[in-house]
Image: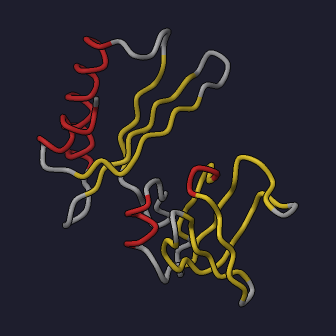
Amino acid sequence: MLRPAVEMLGYELVGIEYFPAGKRHTLRIYIDEEGGITVDDCERVSRQASSLLDVEDPIKGQYTLEVSSPGLDRPLFTAEHFMRFSGSRVRLRTFAPINGRRNFQGILRGMLDGQVNLEVDGEQVLLPLEDVEKARIVPDL
């Protein structure tokens, strides 16, 4: 529902996160564009998204809407993201343990047969994309 509105404004919708936490729910929208994102860009998307969310009302109750750039520790949501940022160091968490662990950190090697291809300590680890709860780039600082 939000993708067409964000893209109409000229931005890439990187992803959306929803954090239900007690009485303070948060809906976070990540946007990007070639030259980077400014506060004005976030404000423009926030106004558009807020209007659309008010009309469609997909989330019951109160929540805080945040619009943000992906930042240096960019979140990865889609297979395209995992391909585009191949070669980057990433930190990844799965919904359930895979081979006894949920947290992985290594070099992203893209996608292979619908699975995230990760090099961890010199060994290939394949993780089904649908099992990935959260993934972020680890910035080189």
Seen as rendered, the residue at the extreme bottom is 122
66, above or below 57, in the image: below
Residue at x 83% of width, y 61% of height: 101
Q: Which percent across, then down, holds residue 58? A: 39, 16
- 71 relative to 126 in the view: left or right: left
- Left or right: 21, with 87 as reference point: right
Q: Which residue is depicted at the point 49% across and 57% down? A: 75
Number of numbered callouts drawn: 0
x 35%, y 51%: residue: 14
The residue positioned farthest toward the front in the image shown: 113
In this picture, is 54 found above or below 66? above
Q: State the image coordinates of residue 67 (x, y, percent, origin top left).
A: 35, 40
State which quadrant residue 64 falls in.
top left
Q: Quadrant of residue 34?
A: bottom left
Residue 19 point in image, percent of width and height:
58, 31
Foreground: 66 or 95?
Answer: 95
Q: Quadrant of the N terminus?
A: top left
Instruction: Return the residue found at the far right.
Output: 100
Q: Position of residue 36 (x, y in %)?
A: 25, 63
Q: Is residue 84 above or below residue 31?
A: below
